[in-house]
Image (tube, rainbow, N blue to C red):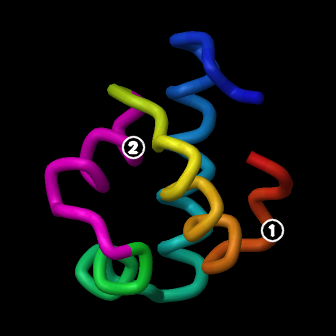
Amino acid sequence: MLSTPGNKKVFGIKLRLIRIKKQYSQEYCIRKVVCDMKSWYRWENGISYPQPIYRQKIQNLFPELGKL
């Protein structure tokens, strides 16, 4: 599981790059994952790591991220 500070950054970079590659807006992802803008911003910027319920939803949206 990605839980160290460095891994939060790596996760955030991957999350943003895959979102952009799929041409999904942040708003679209927020609606699909059912979270708030602040949380999504913190995840994409490597400030925090999603809780298990959100990790599952993110994995469903972006299976290419692998097991979270």
Q: Is residue 9 above or below residue 58?
A: above
Q: Amino acid at mark 2?
A: Trp
Quarter of the view holding residue 36: bottom left
Residue numbers of the magenta segment: 34-46
Q: What secondary structure prevails in the magenta region?
A: helix
Q: Is residue 12 magenta?
A: no
Count of marks, rendered view: 2
> Mark 1 — residue?
64
Q: Position of residue 67 (x, y in %)?
A: 83, 51
Quarter of the view holding residue 22: bottom right
Within 10 Å of the Cα at label 1, are there few (<14), some (14-19), or many (20+) other Cα atoms? few
x 30%, y 84%: residue: 31
29 sits left or right of 23 in the view? left
- Secondary structure beneath disc 2? helix
Q: Is residue 30 above or below residue 46?
A: below
Q: Position of residue 11 (x, y in %)?
A: 60, 39
11 sits left or right of 34 in the view? right
Q: Amino acid at mark 1?
A: Glu
Q: Position of residue 48 (x, y in %)?
A: 38, 29
Q: Nearer the viewer, residue 68 or 5?
A: 68
> Mark 2 — residue?
43
Q: Are marks 1 and 2 in contact (CB under 8 Å)?
A: no
x 15%, y 50%: residue: 38
